[in-house]
Image (tube, coloured by chain):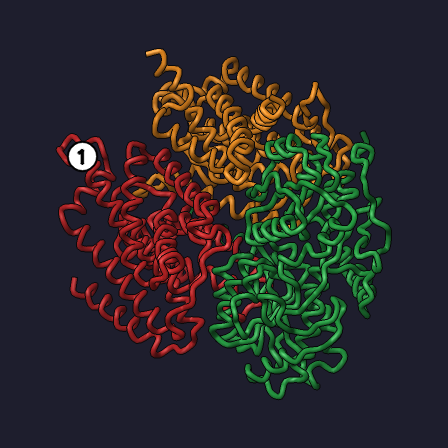
């Protein structure tokens, strides 16, 4: 009886495991590039977007002849969103799979840990999303980055604030991850430079149910603007609860990540309207292929794509370009080709230089978007705007009171 | 008696020559991680399996050890290797505090208190940014580029840990520990100072776990609160390593460490690239199923129920011959 | 004053939901001595049931209680009968095997959910989702108030069940002294099965009630399991009144911690209270009453 039960448990387990069916990856003999992304775990959502974008680009590149005739093979490994797994995974990619370079990098803490490995192993790593400054501010010569660091995310916001909103006080709320902490810190610096007094700066553990304690405090302090650095679900809860409390500053500003995703709108509903956010890309920008990429992605995966996808897609093209130009697939030759990059992508122009304290950094601009009547419109800088920004905002009316 | 010793010697020799024979850094890395778990699992086993105090918070000691090493490097500018010594000692001090608070509790209450303790430390590490750099974590540059030194240090660590536990359990202390596990009140009434011996067990357990943590800092070169104070990936993993291998046995946790690390990576990498990609999606599920299976059928772990496994395996054969 | 009142209200309301989570676990711990580390995952299952009913069949989350509670009751019974009761017979050195079994179950439940629904965040769309009404200057979130009322209703129903019905009394007897209860003719195996089912049904209610306010993803359960512990310890194991007090206390303490100490420390408040109570007041809050009396 017991042995029968044991056999059944084993069979059930094996069946369950096999039931997790999907197509297998095809092996190929060509140029191997390792990509480290969170495919499972709490950050899986973004990992999936970037993986899909990478694959889309890879297909197009190979269809157009690959890397001088060789197929571009992306070995996408799941770092589960944890830095220790990320490190192990990258070591495997480098020592076992013998990839010639590395790409990817979502989540600042994982990217940072992974970059440390690449620097030590002397393998070029092209970061496309991890935004902590220190990734390219540590003087690591093997690490290059396409996206701007988090301290530059709010550059466009700064310009909007100083020319239009002109707030005197601000409250800063952030998720206490690496990304959130740094984002809050850099916005604090912006406030200082614009003479804005920060009346409250508080971090929170993500995944909270009830943000009313801190929102009530903010309401009492009545700041002109509320700046939040949050991932999607916290962002939507924050806005929904602000609406419930009738917390009405002059402006709600999101520091990227959560506030630009379509899920933010669908979850926060009317509470998402008129919220502005910093972003790094929008499909209407005058970069060749930007709108095409947006449409292609939407058609294939049935969901809109934001800057994360654009970063991954462009990164793949940059990688292909670098590998085509490299004299050989030796690490030093790839590094040289990487440093000489000068091309246009859907994310914008890509050229690596020194940007303040950051080395091997691509100088990318940031923009401001605003949810207007359910669409994420580019509102600043005015020359690229699809719609004029809405300010001042009658929050109670927007919220349906 | 002699056969067992011979097996151990052969095993030791195999481990000594392993990295010289296997040149892949990937596999060497896996074994190093396994050796770390041998230490954590054995330490946990000393406190839980032998002394009966089932801790759900061993991450406290691991994390404290890791952060001691890390903070020495970042705040005092001295090499993180000093953390190997100080990490163990700091973990012991913390252990005394944990013991003082938690030992007045029994059974599930003790378990929950240690669980809460682990979470408290994680939150402290996250919020006390001036000391720990919070969620930014601590990153250092590895001292050695080759894996060999790390491998041998880890091996030394694991062997010393198991050896120490072996000698402790053979001594009078071991006898006291087990009697506390079997019936604490009876032991107390026999004149055994249960509080003293529970604390001794805890101190040794914390010491080695702390050293493992410090080693982790030196080897992985990056830690943050969620990595080293993790409830699931450190505390519960330690318990699983102990249980799967066999609580209350010397070599049990070592076996458990190999099984757990092996299974995890086998699945995460889709059987090292041999199986289709989707297998890696199932790794967490496989882990859960393994836990259920082991608890259900091999409650005393692979080592503890080894006789049962042998019987079971041999029992099937005669039946099929009929 | 406003800040204080608003914090208090927020704490009370969330406390109501916490009660349901805590009572479920307290029952299970009190009757069987099992630390159910899959408690949050059971809640997750109920939340997915509510989600599916809401998205595909347009059934209101509050009505979904009619489905999710019995479904989880059934699941709880199955888990206890096939996975946990058998362990009682296994001879092992440590009694903590039941706990680890729940860990395994929790992982498997989470992964099945991830496989079916992916890691995406899901939520239910209701017309009253973010609505709040105001009494004076204090905002009351409508779904949470409804949840609070439901929690009261369910708790009262549970009380009546435990005190007035035969089954309820058997459960309480088993909680007090399992061996004596068996000697009196109570089938303790059956009782454990039903109790686990009951605990699961209660946490299912909490999950369904939480859907309009929060969101859903496969890993949502973990933090709630931890909260359930704190509540159990606060209230004393197996003590329903205690669990209620514990739930409300936790909600209020978290709220005040968030407002007056800082949002980053909110979670720590729970654990610190936990350890303090464990150490200083062994019998939980109700033990405090006894302490004061003596």
Report the quarter where the N terminus of chain B lies. bottom left
Of residues B218 and B80, which is closer to you in this image? B80
Taking the image as shown, residue B138 lies to the left or right of residue B152, namely: right
In the rendered image of the structure, the colour used to display chain C is orange
Residue B223 seen anywhere in this rendered image of the structure: yes
Relative to A32, is C129 above or below? above
Q: Is residue A334 left or right of residue C287?
A: right
Pointer 1 chain: B
Which residue corresponds to the image point at 57% horizontal and 27% vertical from the top-left?
C11
Indicate the chain coloured red by its letter.
Answer: B
Q: In this view, does A1 lie above or below B36?
A: above
Give the number of marks.
Answer: 1
**Residue positioned most to the front:** A195
| Residue at the limit of the structure toward the bottom, as seen here | A327
Please state the horizontal and vertical placement of residue A312, each as a whole percent of the image: 68, 66
Q: In the image as oriented, which residue stretches furthest toward the top?
A: C293
Looking at the image, which residue is at 70% across and 86% down?
Answer: A68
Q: Chain A is drawn in which colour?
A: green
Q: Mark 1 points at which residue?
A: B187
Viewer-proximal residue among B306 and B234: B234
* Left or right of A61 in this view: C219: left
Q: In this view, does A219 lie to the left or right of B235?
A: right
Residue A246, percent across and down?
72, 30
Q: Where is residue B277 in the image (x, y as percent from the top left)?
A: 59, 66
Can residue B290 be seen in this snapshot?
no
């Amino acid at each position: 009886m017991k042995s029968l039960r044991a056999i059944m448990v084993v069979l059930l387990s094996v069946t369950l495991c096999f039931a997790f069916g999907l197509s297998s990856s095809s092996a190929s003999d060509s140029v191997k590039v390792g990509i480290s992304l969170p495919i499972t775990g709490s950050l899986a959502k973004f990992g999936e977007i970037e993986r899909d974008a990478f694959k889309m680009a890879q297909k197009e590149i190979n269809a157009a002849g690959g890397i001088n005739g060789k197929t571009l093979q992306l070995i996408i490994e799941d770092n589960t969103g944890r830095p220790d797994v990320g490190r192990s995974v990258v070591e495997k990619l480098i020592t076992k799979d013998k990839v010639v370079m590395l790409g990817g990098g979502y989540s600042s803490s994982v990217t940072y840990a992974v970059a440390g490995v690449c620097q030590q192993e002397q393998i070029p790593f092209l970061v496309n999303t991890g935004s902590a400054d220190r990734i390219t501010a540590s003087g690591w010569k093997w690490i290059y980055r396409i996206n701007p660091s988090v301290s530059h995310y709010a550059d466009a916001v700064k310009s909007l604030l100083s020319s239009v909103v002109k707030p005197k006080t601000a409250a800063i709320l952030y998720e206490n991850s690496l990304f959130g902490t740094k984002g809050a810190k850099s916005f604090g610096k912006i406030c200082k430079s614009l003479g804005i007094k920060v009346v409250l700066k508080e971090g929170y553990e993500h995944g909270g149910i009830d943000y009313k304690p801190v929102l009530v405090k903010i309401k009492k302090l009545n700041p002109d603007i509320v700046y939040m650095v949050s991932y999607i679900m916290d962002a939507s809860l924050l806005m929904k609860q602000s609406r419930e409390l009738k917390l009405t500053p002059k402006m709600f500003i999101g520091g990227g990540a959560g506030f630009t995703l379509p899920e933010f709108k669908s979850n926060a509903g009317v509470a998402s309207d008129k919220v502005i956010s910093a972003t790094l890309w929008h499909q209407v920008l005058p970069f060749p292929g930007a709108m095409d990429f947006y449409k292609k992605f939407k058609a294939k995966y049935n969901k809109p794509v934001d800057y994360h996808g654009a970063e991954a897609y462009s990164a793949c093209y940059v990688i292909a370009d670098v590998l085509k130009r490299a004299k050989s697939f030796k690490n030093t030759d790839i590094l040289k080709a990487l440093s000489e990059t000068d091309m246009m992508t859907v994310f914008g122009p890509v050229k690596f230089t020194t940007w303040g304290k950051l080395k091997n950094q691509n100088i990318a601009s940031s923009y401001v978007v605003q949810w207007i009547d359910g669409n994420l419109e580019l509102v600043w800088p005015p020359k690229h705007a699809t719609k004029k920004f809405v300010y001042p905002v009658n929050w109670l009316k927007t919220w349906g009171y | 008696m002699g056969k067992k010793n011979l097996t151990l010697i052969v095993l030791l020799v195999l481990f000594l020559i392993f990295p010289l024979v296997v040149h892949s850094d990937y596999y060497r890395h896996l074994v190093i991680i396994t050796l770390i778990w041998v230490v954590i699992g054995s330490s946990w086993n000393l406190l839980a399996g032998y002394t009966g105090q089932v801790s759900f918070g061993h991450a406290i000691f691991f994390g404290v050890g890791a952060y001691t090493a890390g903070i020495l490097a970042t705040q005092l500018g001295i090499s993180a290797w000093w953390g190997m010594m100080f990490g163990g000692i700091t973990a012991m001090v913390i252990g005394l505090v944990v013991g003082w608070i938690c030992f007045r509790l029994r059974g599930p209450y003790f378990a929950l208190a240690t669980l809460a303790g682990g979470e408290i430390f994680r939150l402290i590490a996250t919020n006390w940014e001036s000391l720990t750099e919070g969620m930014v974590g601590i990153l250092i540059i590895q001292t050695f580029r080759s894996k060999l030194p790390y491998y041998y240090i880890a091996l030394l660590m694991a062997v010393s840990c198991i050896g120490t536990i072996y000698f402790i359990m053979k001594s009078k202390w071991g006898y006291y520990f087990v009697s506390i596990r079997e019936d604490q009140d009876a032991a107390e009434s026999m004149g055994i100072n249960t509080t003293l011996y529970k604390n001794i067990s805890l101190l040794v357990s914390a010491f080695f776990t702390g050293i493992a943590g410090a080693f982790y800092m030196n080897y992985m070169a990056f830690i943050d609160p969620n990595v080293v104070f993790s409830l699931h990936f450190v505390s519960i993993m330690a318990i699983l390593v102990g249980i799967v291998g066999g609580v209350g046995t010397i070599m049990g946790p070592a076996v458990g460490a190999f099984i757990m690390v092996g299974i995890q990576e086998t699945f995460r990498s889709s059987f090292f690239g041999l199986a289709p990609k989707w297998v890696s999606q199932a790794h967490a599920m496989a882990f859960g199923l393994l836990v259920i299976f082991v608890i259900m059928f091999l409650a005393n772990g692979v080592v503890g129920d080894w006789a049962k496994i042998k019987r079971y395996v041999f029992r099937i054969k005669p039946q099929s011959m009929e | 004053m406003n800040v204080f009142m608003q914090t208090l209200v927020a704490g009370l309301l969330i406390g109501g939901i916490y009660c349901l989570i805590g009572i479920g676990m307290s029952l299970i711990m009190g009757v069987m001595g099992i630390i159910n580390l899959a408690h949050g995952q059971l809640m997750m299952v109920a939340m997915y049931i509510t989600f599916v009913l809401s998205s595909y069949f347009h059934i209101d989350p509050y009505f979904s209680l009619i489905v999710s509670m019995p479904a989880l009751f059934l699941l709880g019974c199955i888990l206890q009968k096939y996975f946990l009761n058998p362990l009682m017979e296994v001879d092992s050195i440590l009694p903590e095997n039941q706990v680890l079994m729940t860990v395994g179950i929790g992982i498997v439940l989470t992964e099945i959910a991830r496989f079916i629904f992916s890691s995406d965040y899901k939520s239910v769309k209701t017309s009253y989702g973010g609505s709040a009404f105001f009494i004076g200057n204090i905002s009351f979130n409508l779904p949470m108030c409804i949840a609070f009322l439901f929690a009261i209703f369910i708790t009262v129903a549970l009380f009546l069940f435990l005190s007035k019905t035969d089954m309820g009394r058997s459960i309480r007897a088993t909680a007090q002294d399992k061996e004596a209860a068996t000697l009196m003719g109570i089938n303790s195996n059956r009782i454990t099965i039903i109790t686990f089912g009951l605990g699961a049904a209660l946490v299912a209610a909490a999950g369904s009630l939480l859907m309009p306010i929060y969101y859903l993803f496969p890993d949502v359960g973990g933090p709630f399991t931890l909260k359930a512990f704190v509540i159990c310890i606060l209230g004393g194991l197996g003590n329903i009144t205690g669990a209620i007090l514990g739930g409300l206390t936790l909600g209020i303490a978290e709220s005040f911690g968030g407002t007056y100490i800082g949002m980053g420390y909110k979670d720590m408040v729970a654990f610190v209270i936990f350890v303090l109570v464990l150490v200083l007041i062994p019998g939980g809050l109700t033990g405090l009453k006894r302490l004061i009396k003596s």
